[in-house]
Image (cartoon, rainbow, N blue to C red):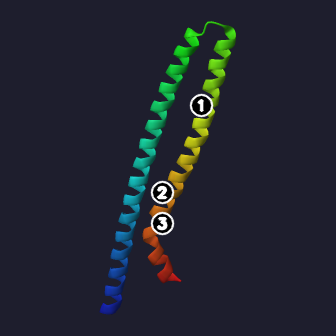
Amino acid sequence: MSETTYEEFSKYGKEFADTGLKSFASLSKGAQAIAVEASEYTKNSLEAGSAAFEKLLSAKTFEEALGVQADYVKQSYESFVAEATRFGDLYSELAREAYKPFEGIVAKAR
């Protein structure tokens, strides 16, 4: 094995390791953003549930209680759909950012 080949192999190995570290950093950052978003959603969901329960307890009529429950269900569904969309966007961004460091290597391989 010539010295040039060893240097090229060493350079390629270092480049691949650096790329892997960059990708791992992107994964860590994305996972942290997802965890923060999940925590915030859980907090907001619990607060909305508590507020709805308080309103339900203070309802004077059965119809008023049904209205409170219907409003809560509608709000919960809309919040869930919005959050599911947000999580989808976060996971897509995570995948894009994790792949980005490897784009150069893939381009060179072609």
Question: Which class describes the residues within 10 Å of circle 2: few (<14), some (14-19), or many (20+)?
Answer: many
| Residue at 47 percent of width and 25 percent of height | 47
Is disc 3 placed on a helix, strand or loop? Answer: helix
Picture coordinates of residue 5 (x, y %)? Answer: 36, 89
Look at the picture and state if 41 lies above or below 10: above
Of residue 96 and residue 50, the one placed in the foreground of this image is 50
Residue holding disc 2: 94
Horizontal side, residue 28 vs residue 42: left or right: left
The first of marks 3 and 1 along the sequence is 1
Provide the residue designation for mark 3.
Answer: 99
Structural distance between the alpha carbons of marks 3 and 1: 34 Å
| Residue at position x 60%, y 10% in the image | 59
Q: Quadrant of residue 8?
A: bottom left
Residue 77 to residue 10: above or below: above
Residue 27: give its label: none
- Mark 1 highlights which residue? 76
Q: Is residue 2 left or right of residue 55?
A: left
